[in-house]
Amino acid sequence: MAVIDGENVDVLAEGGFVEMTLRADMTVDGRLFVPEPISGDEGFDTDVDLEGTYSISGNEVTFDQMKTPLSEMSSGATKMID
């Protein structure tokens, strides 16, 4: 679920998805896709390469993205990160 403009939106039902593979060598590969009506980027889908690395500390996993960080994406797209 995403909260967009105060309303709950089922991102999966709208065609969105996130795929991530965490490997033993501490690398990550994956993709985040949010269709245009949800992404907030009028006329454009949000399609993000999730290549990067990760680290584990206790029961917490930290992801370090190699390309444009999710935090630098448009405000519409970052609203779906909950």
Image: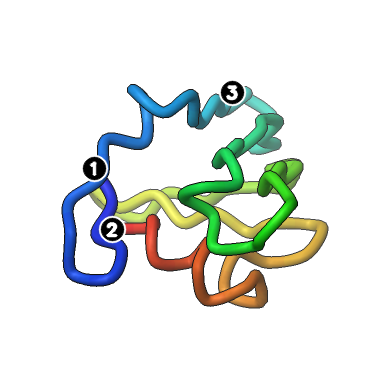
Nearer the camera: disc 2 or disc 1:
1
Q: Amino acid at mark 1?
A: Met
64 lies above or below 46 = below
- Identified at 46% across, 50% down, the residue is 38
Q: Residue under circle 2?
A: 82
Q: Amino acid at mark 3?
A: Thr
26 displayed left or right of 67: left
Quarter holding the N terminus? top left
- Residue 24 at what x, y percent from top left? 61, 24
46 displayed left or right of 58: right
The disc label shown at residue 17, or none = none
- Residue 55 at what x, y percent from top left? 52, 51
Query: Of label 3 and label 1, which has the lower sequence position?
Result: 1
28 lies above or below 61 = above
Q: Helix, strand or loop at disc 2?
A: loop
The disc label shown at residue 1, or none = 1
- Identified at 66% across, 77% down, the residue is 72
Q: Residue under circle 3?
A: 21
Of residue 59 and residue 38, the one placed in the foreground of this image is 38
Q: Residue 57, located in which quarter of the rendered image?
A: bottom left
Q: Helix, strand or loop at disc 3?
A: strand
> Alpha-carbon distance for marks 2 and 3?
20 Å
